[in-house]
């Protein structure tokens, strides 16, 4: 009887060896759970303080006047913000385009003006190098500068420029 048991054990072991232990394969298995989050970026630009009542009287002058609050919202590690100026940095009269006032701009934070970066005002979108570019909600401000000549005598009326802010993730 002993010989038969030994023989059965050997047959069993040989079956295990040649089947790769398939008898035990169904005893456990693993599953890896994976979740994904799609990239998401958005931007809001809101006029700030006196953005819609700029003084263009003779000799009027502003320096680093905050006129737009930009909220950059992103769940990606890297993104870019661009700015387009319909009039390439000119406030143009509503009916007489020859009547206009040029301005310059910078982009940064209200906290530290030394971090502000000059902005190229163009009819083609320009990257704002001062934009935060990291995941989260990042506030930015657009500041303008201009000086109206003492003899400018600009025509009465509204002078405008439309600014378009865009955010994109690679």
Image (spheres, rainbow, N blue to C red):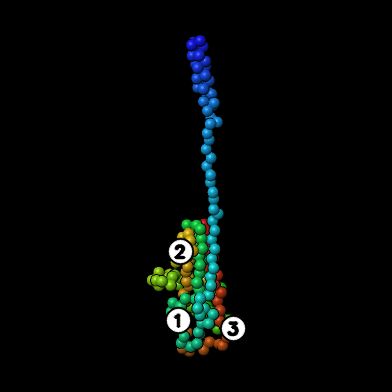
Q: Nearer the viewer, residue 109 or 102?
A: 109
Q: Can you give x and y, in whole percent of width and height, for residue 5 in the image?
A: 50, 14
- Discs 2/1, front: 2
Query: Residue 8, image x and y in percent?
Result: 52, 15
Relative to 99, residue 118 above or below: above
Identified at 61% across, 83% down, the residue is: 95
Q: Nearer the viewer, mark 3 or mark 1?
A: 1
What whole-number distance in Å separates the C-alpha atoms at marks 2 and 3? 38 Å
Q: Nearer the viewer, residue 33 or 50?
A: 33
What residue occupies the far front of the structure in this picture? 1
Other-residue count near label 1 (Cα within 10 Å), few / some / many at <14 / 14–19 / ≥20: some
Work out whether residue 125 can be spotted.
no
Say which residue appears at 55% left-offset and 76% top-offset: 161
Kind of element beneath mark 1: strand
Reading the image, the residue beneath label 3 is 96
Q: First in sequence, mark 2 or 3: give its number.
A: 3
Q: CA distance from mark 3 to mark 1?
A: 24 Å
Q: Secondary structure at mark 3?
A: loop
Q: Residue furthest left?
A: 114
Q: Nearer the viewer, residue 41 or 8?
A: 8
Q: Which mark is residue 34?
A: none
Give residue 35's position: percent from left, percent from top: 54, 49
Give the CA distance from mark 2 to mark 1.
Answer: 26 Å
The residue shown at (51%, 63%) is 73
Residue 132 shows which numbered tag?
2
- Residue located beneath label 1 in the image: 62
The mark lying in front, picked from 2 and 3, is 2
């Amino acid at each position: 009887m002993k010989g038969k048991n030994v023989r059965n054990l050997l047959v069993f072991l040989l079956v295990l060896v040649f089947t790769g232990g398939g008898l035990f394969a169904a005893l456990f298995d693993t599953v890896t759970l994976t979740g994904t989050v799609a990239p998401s970026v958005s931007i809001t630009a809101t006029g700030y303080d006196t953005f819609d009542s700029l003084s263009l009287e003779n000799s009027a002058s502003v320096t680093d006047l905050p006129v737009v609050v930009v909220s950059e919202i992103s769940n990606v590690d890297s993104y870019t913000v661009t700015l387009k100026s319909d009039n390439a940095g000119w406030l143009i009269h509503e009916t007489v385009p020859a009547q206009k006032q040029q301005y310059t701009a910078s982009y940064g934070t209200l906290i530290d003006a030394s971090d502000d970066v000059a902005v190229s005002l163009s009819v083609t979108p320009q990257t704002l190098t001062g934009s935060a570019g990291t995941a989260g909600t990042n506030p930015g401000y657009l500041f303008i500068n201009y000086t109206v000549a003492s003899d400018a005598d600009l025509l009465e009326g509204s002078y405008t420029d439309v600014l378009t802010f865009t955010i994109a993730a690679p």
